[in-house]
Image (cartoon, rainbow, N blue to C red):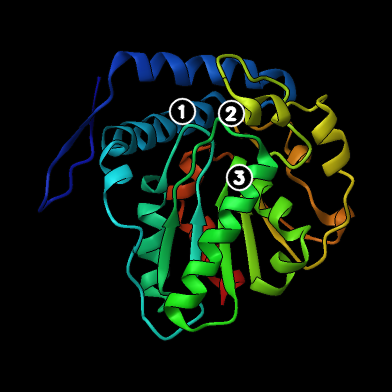
């Protein structure tokens, strides 16, 4: 499947492999029972945007396990650390990093981790990464920008005293703070803990926030649904709801990038 993303001066095509298209369609069908109806045209456009986001990032995934953790940005500001979601790595933040560089935020770092591990262990590893960044930059605290599972890991880190000292800003995007309803095909300790009925989620989802955390989420996320799953207002956070974006597509949204930049700044 080829999507023509042509302009007058720079025509190009994005190839969407059939298995990606099938995966996106299935996820949107599962989503229907948890989201409000919307016009078919909007659904098809969102599915297309999601498929393009997957087709662009996933072929690059192996390289971003090897490429350096720096993602640009000025060297004298508060460090920003991107924390990816399940089965992913820092490649998902290519567009968002570009937007934050334009806003002169950073330096920017991407934290890769083994998503099969349990969430408290991953929070400890994030903490060690934060310490290295603080030592490297000489800055006392960082901003965290997380997607999906990464947001749950960040809140676990914030539940510790050292996390509360080291984090000056925290933004989560499409994060299942109350757990996911559907985790078919997901493996590992972290995936089990992400389920809405897991003992971990039942405890962590009721934990008050020690600081103001911004949660950005979509009315029609094809992976994390219903949208109330991502709400943090009742726990002391700030919620920003965007319309119609898919789970990975949110990271390639100008609207989401602008909200993120304001929250980090």
Report if residue 259 is visible in the image.
no
Q: Are marks 2 and 3 in contact (CB under 8 Å)?
A: no
Number of other residues with Cα within 10 Å of mark 1, as a class: few under 14, some 14 to 19, many 20 or more:
many
Report if residue 247 is visible in the image.
yes
Residue drawn 71% across the image and 68% down it: 162
User: What is the spatial separation of the Cα atoms under label 3 and label 1, in whole angstroms?
Assistant: 31 Å
Could you say where residue 154 lies in the image, as x and y percent from the top left?
A: 65, 54
Q: Compare residues 198 and 28 and report the one nearer the observer.
A: 198
Residue drawn 47% across the image and 32% down it: 87
Mark 3 or 1 closer to N-term?
A: 1
Residue behind mark 3 = 122
User: What is the spatial separation of the Cα atoms under label 2 and label 3, in whole angstroms?
Assistant: 25 Å
Q: Compare residues 61 and 199 and report the one nearer the observer.
A: 199
Residue behind mark 1 = 47
Could you say where residue 198 lies in the image, as x and y percent from the top left?
A: 81, 26
- Residue 170's image quarter? bottom right
Mark 2 or 1 closer to N-term?
A: 1
User: What is the spatial separation of the Cα atoms under label 2 and label 1, in whole angstroms?
Assistant: 9 Å
* Residue 237 versus residue 30 in the image, above or below: below
Residue behind mark 2 = 222
Residue drawn 36% across the image and 46% down it: 91
Mark 1 lies on a secondary structure that is: helix
Number of other residues with Cα within 10 Å of mark 2, as a class: few under 14, some 14 to 19, many 20 or more:
many
Q: Are marks 2 and 1 in contact (CB under 8 Å)?
A: yes
Question: Nearer the viewer's eye, disc 2 or disc 1?
Answer: 2
Could you say where residue 146 lies in the image, as x and y percent from the top left?
A: 57, 52
Mark 2 or 3 closer to N-term?
A: 3
Specify the quadrant that holds the N terminus.
top left
Number of other residues with Cα within 10 Å of mark 3, as a class: few under 14, some 14 to 19, many 20 or more:
many
- Residue 110's image quarter? bottom left
* Residue 132 versus residue 36 in the image, above or below: below
Could you say where residue 67 lies in the image, as x and y percent from the top left?
A: 26, 51
């Amino acid at each position: 499947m080829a999507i023509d993303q042509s302009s007058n001066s720079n025509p190009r095509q994005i190839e969407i492999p059939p298995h990606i298209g099938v995966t996106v369609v299935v996820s949107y069908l599962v989503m229907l029972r948890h989201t409000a109806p919307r016009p078919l045209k909007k659904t098809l456009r969102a599915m297309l945007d999601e498929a393009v986001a997957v087709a662009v990032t996933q072929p690059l995934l192996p390289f971003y396990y090897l490429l350096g953790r720096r993602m640009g940005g000025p060297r004298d500001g508060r460090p920003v650390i991107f924390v990816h979601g399940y089965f992913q790595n820092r490649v998902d933040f290519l567009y968002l990093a570009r937007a934050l560089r334009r806003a002169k935020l950073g330096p920017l770092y991407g934290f890769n981790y083994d998503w099969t591990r349990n969430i408290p262990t991953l929070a400890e590893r994030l903490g060690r990464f934060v310490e290295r960044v603080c030592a490297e930059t000489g800055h006392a605290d960082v901003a965290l920008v997380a997607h999906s599972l990464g947001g749950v890991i960040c809140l676990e880190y914030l539940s510790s005293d050292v996390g509360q000292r080291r984090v000056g800003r925290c933004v989560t995007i499409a994060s299942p703070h109350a757990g996911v309803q559907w985790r078919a095909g997901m493996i590992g300790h972290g995936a089990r803990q992400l389920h809405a009925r897991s003992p971990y989620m039942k405890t962590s989802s009721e934990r008050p926030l020690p600081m103001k955390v911004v949660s950005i989420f979509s009315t029609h996320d094809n992976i994390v649904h219903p949208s109330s799953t991502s709400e943090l207002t009742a726990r002391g956070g700030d919620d920003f709801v965007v319309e119609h974006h898919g789970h990975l597509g949110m990271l390639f949204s100008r609207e989401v990038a602008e909200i993120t930049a304001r929250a980090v700044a």
